[in-house]
Amino acid sequence: MRKVVKKKYKFVVIATDVVIFTLKEGQLQVLLIKMKKAPYEKYWALPGGMIKAKESINEAAKKHLFNKTGVKNVYLEQLYTFGRADRDPFGRVVSVAYFALMPFNGLKLKTTREYSEVNWFPVERLPLLAYDHREMITLAKKRLQAKLSYTNIVYSLLSKEFTLSDLQKVYEMILGKKLDKRNFCKKIFALKLLKKTGAERRGKAFRPAKLYEFVRRQLEVIQIL
Amino acid sequence: MRKVVKKKYKFVVIATDVVIFTLKEGQLQVLLIKMKKAPYEKYWALPGGMIKAKESINEAAKKHLFNKTGVKNVYLEQLYTFGRADRDPFGRVVSVAYFALMPFNGLKLKTTREYSEVNWFPVERLPLLAYDHREMITLAKKRLQAKLSYTNIVYSLLSKEFTLSDLQKVYEMILGKKLDKRNFCKKIFALKLLKKTGAERRGKAFRPAKLYEFVRRQLEVIQIL
DNA sequence: CCAAAAGTGTTTGTGCTACACCCATGT
DNA sequence: ACATGGGTGTAGCACAAACACTTTTGG
């Protein structure tokens, strides 16, 4: 064990890939990059890249996400490590997949030489995906659904201020089912996670909604649903 | 991304380590191996080893567990990937940690040339551990506690037949708190996970206990506690 | 008969579910 | 005035928690 750097190991390299979700146009969407290299021209892929000898995997994941899409300061956690021997046609690559969340802010996404486009795609309508990236997205969605019900992680999908309906819609979108408005409010208030900001949001032709913010913007393990 | 095998990546190697738990002498115990190599003479470590170019990580974890300890056919799942740049003094090693469970069967553990001893240690009284293996064990214990309450995973810690007290003791040991016998039975029976085997176990000087077995010995996600 | 563990019900309170109407606003 | 989403309460039920005594056995 760990008798370092025998020749036979030199072809195993390590990459990271980040499944980053946001809510956009009432749908859960994931950020993808269009590839240029054969055999994957016209395929889309998760933002990621290989790690260097002197950086930790977590740092590498953050770095590649930022370099390839311009996204930073988001909730990020390790998801799963994909290690099938044949998962990458270019060689032996083990990928540590990460799972990330951000509020949709409409900012323009960065593009680079290497990739022709960067874009959000609804999780239910994904384009052609390279490698085993579809599997990563499926797993990430399951993780998100699970975490939504036993943590307060939803804070990382909403901007600072939001209405109760916004919050409820997040749950409905991700869990894929309708919730009862009165019961939902009751539970959320009982948990004392929110405080009123005092402001209101006015819409076209209806009663203004009170705005709320989270008391604490950090992960807590709490039964929510 | 994935422009394979640039020279600078050749020093990153991938290893697996398995945190395998059992219940022995009324305690949660973990299987460790005594190392021989400097600077870790007299340290203990989790069973593991480097992966080869053509095997998947899952296969590698199973294989190393078997080769170093003789343990096989146990519940095994991926735990977390440890990727700090300085976690191994011998070089850059990323380790994919696994989490495993087995019933204690008293079988003699295999030893190899490379390691002087293989032994079970109570999680609460660990010896000096190499690398970041203590961190792995801590994380695995948390995972076990969580899974115990939302899955039927306990089946993989018990032998085929067991009494209700055995089952309850497993929960008490791992969660570290006493449970009410009557409420515990009520819940377990309501879930219809068990069936009587018909046999009984007799002790020294008290009423014999009925033996049960699990209806299904496979992981199910169910709220148990 | 004594010690040790097995086995078994009821009560009380809490939390989840289901359900429908009035309010404030802009056009 | 009307259309739209905002906001609010109650009753019934099921589940969780607290709680103690009798049974069976071997010595």
Image (spheres, coloured by chain):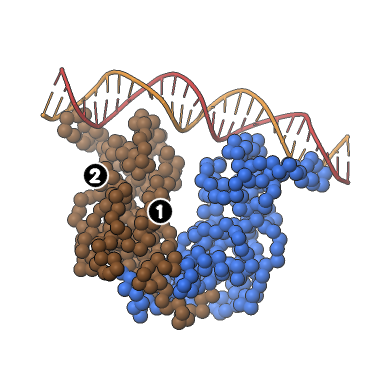
Chain colours: A blue, B brown, C red, D orange
Most foreground residue, A93 or B210 = A93
Looking at the picture, does residue B103 appear above or below residue A64?
Answer: above
Q: Secondary structure at mark 1?
A: helix
**Percent x, y for residue B77?**
39, 57
**Percent x, y for residue A47?**
57, 68
Q: Secondary structure at mark 2?
A: loop
Most foreground residue, A98 or B77 = A98
Residue most extreme to the bottom: B7
Looking at the picture, does residue A154 appear above or below residue D6?
Answer: below
**Percent x, y for residue B89?**
36, 70
Most foreground residue, B94 or A142 = B94
Residue corresponding to mark 2: B25
Q: Is residue A41 left or right of residue B32?
A: right
Q: Earlier in the sequence, mark 1 or mark 2?
A: 2
Q: Is residue B212 visible?
A: no
To the question of a shared chain for discs 1 and 2, the answer is yes
Residue type, mark 2 in image: Glu
Residue B139: mark in rendering: 1
Marks 1 and 2, Cα distance to the nearest angstrom? 22 Å
**Which residue does the image show at 62% across and 53% down from the upper left?**
A157
Q: Is residue A40 left or right of residue B148?
A: right
